[in-house]
Image: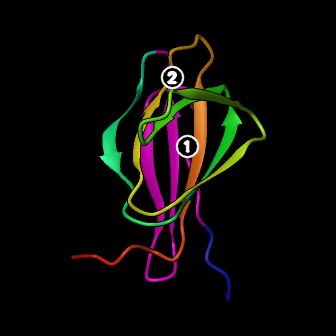
Amino acid sequence: MIEQVFHYSLGDNKSIEKIIFDENLNYIHMVFPKGGGAPEHYTNGNVYMTVLRGVLSIKLGEQEARDYTRGSIIKIPHNTKMLIKNPYEAVLELIIVKAPAPEVK
């Protein structure tokens, strides 16, 4: 078999899954029920965030938080301060791609 096959969870419970983490890219699947999110941090690479379902509330740098809905793809530059939250009833599901993959130190 030439190809590699990867799977991610299909549930509604909080989940942060590192699906592919290699020298080429990081591919991460995240699920956040209402009130969930990721702590404030600085991006360690170029981030491409795809909203699969729900509404993403994200604060970047010193900007006010903005909402993005299903079908949105957000490109966030390296070393940007970010805060991800789901203040809404609907479950938030995201795919995060970091490309090129950040260097491991």
Amino acid at circle 2: Asn
Residue visible at 60% across and 35% down in the picture: 93
Residue visible at 51% across and 74% down in the picture: 25
Instruction: Specify few, some or many for label 1: CA neighbours under 10 Å numbering under 14, 14-19, or 20 or more.
Output: few
Tell which tag, 2 or 1, sits nearer the viewer: 2
Disc 1 target residue = 9
Residue visible at 55% across and 43% down in the picture: 9
5 in the magenta segment: no
Colouring method of the image: rainbow
SS for dot 1:
loop
Please state, as top left, top right, bottom left or bottom right, where the N terminus lies in the image: bottom right
Residues 24 and 16: in front is: 24
Q: Which residues are magenta?
A: 6-34
15 in the magenta segment: yes
**In the displayed structure, does residue 72 sit left or right of residue 19?**
right
88 in relation to 7, above or below: above
Who comes first in sequence, dot 2 or dot 1?
Answer: 1
SS for dot 2:
loop
Instruction: Specify few, some or many for label 2: CA neighbours under 10 Å numbering under 14, 14-19, or 20 or more.
Output: many
101 in relation to 14, above or below: below
> How many marks on residues?
2
**Separation of residues labelled 2 and 1 (CA atoms):** 19 Å
Please state, as top left, top right, bottom left or bottom right, where the C terminus lies in the image: bottom left
Farthest right residue in view: 71
**In the displayed structure, does residue 64 sit left or right of residue 10?**
left
| Quarter of the view holding residue 41 | top left
Amino acid at circle 1: Ser
Residue 54 % position (x, y): 66, 25
Residue visible at 64% across and 25% down in the picture: 55
Image marks 2 and 1: residues in contact by CB distance under 8 Å: no
User: What label does residue 86 carry, if any?
Assistant: 2
